[in-house]
Amino acid sequence: MENIGTIIFSLREDKDLSLENLASGILSKSQLSKVERGLSDISATKFLKLLDKLHITFSEFNLLYKDISTSPENIYLLKMTQALISGNLNQANLIESDVWKFHTENSSIYAKLNYIMIKAMRLQIEDKKLDTDSLAFLIDYLFKVSNWTRYELILYGNTMTSIPLESINLLTKEISYKTTLYKKINLSIIINLLFNTVILNLEAKNYTQVDYFIRTLSSNEFLDIQLGERFLKEYAKALYDYVRDPVKINEEKNLNLLNILKILDSDNLFIAYSKIFEDFKNETN
């Protein structure tokens, strides 16, 4: 079966499991990394043990496999996400080249949007932004669509770094209206987009906008099991408190929240969110 590693990677990231945590007792961390990148095969016994650790049945995995196997867009997106996380520009360039070829052979609007998304993700590695024409096409589409599904949310989330902050604020404010039909099933993505908008406005010192989006974050009701969403709500508040008043007690609020990720073995998230705090801390020093 092709794409097994890509799906395992996606499931592991979605469930906030580190490579070490998932691999422990089954195979080495480096072996799992190779499996996820499609560089190594895995035995049936070890594969089933991984599924057990991911708390997913073989039948459920098979449904995911069938879905991703018939969707080259999903495969490219997952591979580009891996390249972005690892900062692998060579891999990112190869993926963009493949998607460009797919785009030129398919005239649909989605083929073009998928290429723009993949290109925007590749440009993140180089700290660059989309060209004017691609950006205009993307923004026009996002404003034009009345009911955002998971596709529009993913498209927006992966291209935010190229969109001007003024447009981001307008689009994020419209999310609650644009996702009314599908809000419950896409709440996790929506909360992440709200959090990212808070961070972008904090960086720009747009505190009026920060206030607005933190209130929007807090207005959402979360289930007890939605720990990630609750964390982002509290972390956004803690970062805002620190940026406005970088005293010891506000620094400790952030460190205590980050320590929760450490306790939960969410190593990737700990590193990513710690960097956000460190960047703000360096600005205030």
Image (cartoon, rainbow, N blue to C red):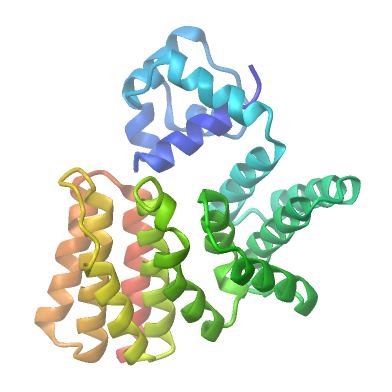
Q: Tell me if residue 66 can be seen.
A: yes
Q: Is residue 134 left or right of residue 105?
A: left
Q: Position of residue 192 (x, y in %)?
A: 39, 60
Q: Is residue 63 left or right of residue 240?
A: right
Q: Tell me if residue 39 can be seen.
A: no
Residue at the extreme top: 45
Q: Which residue is depicted at the point 23% across and 59% down? A: 231
Task: Reply above or below: 166 against 183.
Answer: below
Residue at the extreme right: 105
Q: Which residue is depicted at the point 67% across and 59% down? A: 117
Residue at the extreme left: 249
Task: Reply above or below: 36 against 194.
Answer: above
Task: Reply above or below: 153 against 216.
Answer: above
Badge count: 0
Q: Position of residue 186 (x, y in %)?
A: 41, 50
Q: Nearer the viewer, residue 16 or 227?
A: 227
Q: Which residue is depicted at the point 40% across and 21% down? A: 50
Q: Position of residue 230 (x, y in %)?
A: 21, 57
Q: Is residue 83 left or right of residue 22?
A: right
Q: Is the N terminus in the top left, top right, bottom left or bottom right quadrant?
A: top right
Q: Position of residue 171 (x, y in %)?
A: 51, 74
Q: Is the C terminus in the top left, top right, bottom left or bottom right quadrant?
A: bottom left
Query: Quarter-wise, where is residue 241 in the image?
Result: bottom left
Q: Which residue is depicted at the point 13% across and 73% down? A: 252
